[in-house]
Image: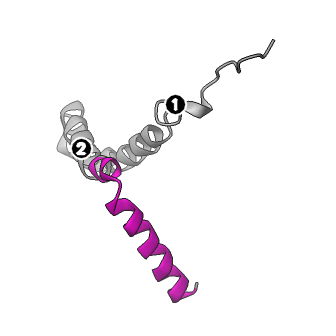
Amino acid sequence: MNPTMTAMTARRILTQLTHDRRTIAMLMGAAGVDGVRLRYVFNSKRAFARLAPSLLGIFHRISSWSPDRHPARTHQRHPGAG
């Protein structure tokens, strides 16, 4: 792994993120909201501590690839298609 290329890639991604406030809000806010929701779903602190980290990862993976965020990937008929 080339440290220069890694630094350049990280800089490019961070520069892009500074211009996209919705992504920053989702990264910061969604994890907190999901954590609170999961805490109320699991009444036991032990169950929450065991299951919450993996469920938070799954929720964010699902929500980042939902059809609402990618309307071009939904199954729509093209105009003129018979």
Say if 66 sits above or below 12 in the image. Answer: above
Return the x and y of residue 76 as percentages of the image width and height: 64, 20
Could you tell which of marks 1 and 2 lies nearer the N-terminus?
A: 2
Question: Could you say which is closer to the camera, residue 3 or residue 36?
Answer: 3
Q: Which residue is mark 1?
A: 67
| Three-letter amino acid code of the residue under disc 2 | Gly
Toward the front, the furthest residue is: 80
Q: Which residue is mark 2?
A: 35
Segment tinted magenta in the rendering: 2-25
Instruction: Label 1, secondary structure: give it.
Output: loop
Would you call the spot at circle 2 few (<14 residues within 10 Å), some (14-19), or many (20 or more)? some
Q: Are marks 1 and 2 in contact (CB under 8 Å)?
A: no
Q: Is residue 8 left or right of residue 27?
A: right
**Is 19 in the magenta?**
yes
Return the x and y of residue 72 as percentages of the image width and height: 59, 33
Q: Is residue 64 left or right of residue 50?
A: right
Quadrant of the image containing the C terminus: top right
**Residue at horizontal 28%, vertical 44%?**
30
**Residue at horizontal 46%, vertical 39%?**
62
Return the x and y of residue 69 as percentages of the image width and height: 47, 36
Return the x and y of residue 78 as percentages of the image width and height: 71, 21
